[in-house]
Image: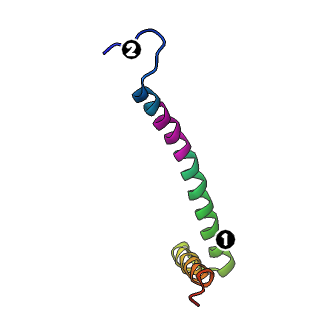
Amino acid sequence: MPTGSGTTRPADLQRGAALASGRNLGYRLNIKMTNAFQSVYEMSKREKINMRQAAYLVSVNRVAEACRLRGWV
């Protein structure tokens, strides 16, 4: 169904919003992944262990911190 000249349908707005949020999502994901890598890499160097062990330590520390913040420990 034609929309006439210069009019925008709600579906067009949603499609544009989805594209914009997709770009934003990629940017936010890149930042999150970069920060995660940096924390694992720093742990690896600080503790002189391999990256796999460092990733495990980082994750356990995050869970332990979440438990402390919730008052479970």
Name the residue located 52 percent from the left edge and 46 percent from the top edge.
25
Name the residue located 48 percent from the left edge and 35 percent from the top edge.
19
Residue on which disc 1 sits:
42
Name the residue located 46 percent from the left edge and 37 percent from the top edge.
18
The quadrant of the picture occupied by the C terminus is: bottom right
Q: Residues within 10 Å of mark 2 (few under 14, many from 20)?
A: few
Marks 2 & 1, CB-CB < 8 Å contact:
no
Q: Earlier in the sequence, mark 2 or mark 1?
A: 2
Magenta stretch: includes residue 18? yes
Q: Position of residue 67 (x, y in %)?
A: 57, 83
Q: Residues within 10 Å of mark 1 (few under 14, many from 20)?
A: some
Q: Which residues are magenta?
A: 16-25
Circle count? 2
User: What amino acid is found at the position of numbered circle 1 in the picture?
Assistant: Glu
- Disc sitting over residue 26 in the figure: none
- Disc sitting over residue 3 in the figure: 2
For the residue pair 73 and 36, the one nearer the viewer reads as: 73
Give above or below for 47 relative to 36.
below
Residue reaching furthest bottom? 73
